[in-house]
């Protein structure tokens, strides 16, 4: 009997500990779900930033040598004039091929924990290599591009000075990543407001902020300095009907499924998102929560560009997301509340234009 009582007491104590940990974890999560001004971006120890490295990265970012036929640079899909997107529903692609997802903005990408809509890269250095090799993006052979860059005296000398090494793809990626870490939203009104300047937002934008953090529940997934939980969610965004029967689009989607060893890749009719990579049930049709900074400049929206305007995006969330999703519920915002929320997104989250001009490529 005594032994049984000890076991019961132990189980009760264990249950209390679990409850306390859960409460503390919940409280901590709630506390972190707030907006924060942008801090200086962190820089990896193995790729310190210098002006010379940034300048080199910028030249490579605009250099068409990185593509197989010399027609495409990073800037084709990440155009400075378009907030470092290409303003297309589905991203631009290598000639004769088709991309199958929307190009996310590179603005504030220094703060991202995962890159690409499916999060397959965790660093900018890793991300920079993928498009170069992709057959439907830049379609370049890595060994070949190293030689194309190495043959240019200005490049070869710059790599020697900056890295103390000869040209290679890893160093090319490091230089491009260094440039991309400078693409920051400077002086966005929300940052001034969060730092204490209550006049930084208009009265309508302030109403929108209240909706964003309250009734609209936007802050549940869009919080912190980056305005993203940096997680993956299945909102069941509908497929873009424009591309249902487009052969090149279908080819690329099948290719992605095939290289990720999806068994029935020939019959794939949807973009399964992160599931292609992880095979985890929770990742079925899940995509990365995008940052909302610069959202007014980065239409169209979602991984397949199906929504052309912020009004459409707000309506999507207001109705509770796509059919069958388990995360969202109808919010029932009024027309005035939707307009105030839109005002906040447009006015508060856009920084000053960076006015970056194409580099002079050697």
Image (tube, helix red, strand yellow):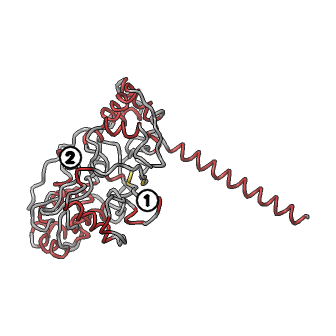
- Which residue occupies 16% across, 63% down? 97
State which quarter of the image contains the C terminus: bottom left
Relative image position of residue 20 (x, y in whole percent): 67, 50
Q: Is residue 327 left or right of residue 249?
A: right
State the separation of the CA atoms marked 1 and 2.
Answer: 27 Å
Label placed on residue 283: 1
Q: Along the line of sight, which residue is nearer the eye, 16 or 225?
A: 16
* Mark 2 burial class by Cα count in 10 Å: few <14, some 14-19, many 20+: many
Which residue is drawn at the image coordinates 28% and 51% (left, top)?
Answer: 304
Tell me if residue 260 comes above or below residue 28 in the rendering.
Answer: below
Mark 2 residue element:
loop
Mark 1: few, some, or many residues within 10 Å (few <14, many ≥20)?
some
Which of these two is toward me, 217 or 146? 217
Task: Give residue 88's position: percent from left, percent from top.
Answer: 20, 48
User: Which of labels 1 and 2 is toward the front?
Assistant: 1
The image's mark for residue 213 is: none
Residue contact at pointers 1 and 2, CB within 8 angstroms = no
Residue at point 27%, 55% (across, down): 101
Question: Does the image show residue 338?
Answer: yes
Residue 87, numbered circle: 2
Residue 158 image-quadrant placement: bottom left
Is residue 36 rendered to the left or right of residue 57?
A: right
- Reply above or below: 226 against 101: above
Q: Is residue 56 visible?
A: no
In the rendered image, residue 266, in percent from the top left (x then y), is placed at 30, 69
Q: Quadrant of residue 119?
A: bottom left
Residue 93 location in percent, x, y? 17, 59
User: Is residue 206 positioned above or below 171 on the image?
Assistant: above
């Amino acid at each position: 009997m005594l032994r049984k009582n000890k076991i019961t007491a132990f189980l009760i104590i264990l249950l209390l500990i679990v409850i306390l940990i859960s409460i503390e974890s919940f409280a901590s999560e709630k506390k972190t779900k707030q907006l924060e001004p942008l801090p200086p971006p962190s820089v990896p120890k193995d790729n310190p930033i210098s002006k010379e490295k940034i300048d080199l990265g910028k030249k490579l970012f605009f250099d068409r040598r990185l593509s197989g036929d010399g027609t495409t640079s990073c800037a084709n899909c990440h155009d400075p004039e378009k907030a470092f997107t290409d303003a297309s529903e589905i991203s631009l692609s290598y000639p004769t091929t088709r991309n199958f997802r929307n190009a996310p903005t590179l603005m504030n990408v220094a703060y991202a924990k995962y890159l690409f809509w499916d999060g397959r890269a965790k660093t900018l250095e890793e991300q920079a290599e993928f498009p170069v090799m992709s057959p439907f993006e830049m379609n370049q052979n890595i060994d070949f591009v190293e030689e194309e860059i190495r043959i240019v005296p200005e490049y070869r000398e710059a790599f020697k000075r900056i890295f103390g090494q000869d040209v290679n793809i890893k160093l090319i990626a490091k230089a491009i990543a260094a440039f991309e870490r400078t693409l920051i939203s400077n002086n966005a009104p929300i940052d001034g407001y969060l730092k204490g300047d209550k006049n930084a937002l208009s009265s309508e934008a302030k109403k929108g902020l209240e909706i964003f953090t309250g009734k609209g529940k936007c802050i549940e997934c869009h919080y912190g300095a980056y305005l993203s939980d940096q997680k993956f969610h299945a909102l069941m965004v509908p497929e873009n009907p424009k591309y249902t029967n487009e052969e090149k689009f279908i080819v690329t989607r099948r290719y992605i499924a095939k290289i990720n060893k999806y068994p029935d890749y020939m019959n794939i009719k949807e973009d399964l998102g992160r599931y292609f990579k992880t095979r985890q049930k929770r990742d079925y049709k899940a995509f990365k929560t995008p940052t909302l900074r610069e959202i007014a400049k980065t239409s169209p929206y979602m991984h397949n560009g199906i929504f052309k305007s912020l009004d459409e995006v707000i309506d999507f969330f207001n109705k509770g997301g796509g059919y069958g999703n388990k995360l969202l519920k109808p919010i029932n915002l009024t027309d005035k509340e939707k307009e105030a929320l839109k005002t906040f997104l447009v006015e508060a989250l856009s920084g000053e234009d960076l006015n970056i001009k194409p580099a002079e490529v050697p």
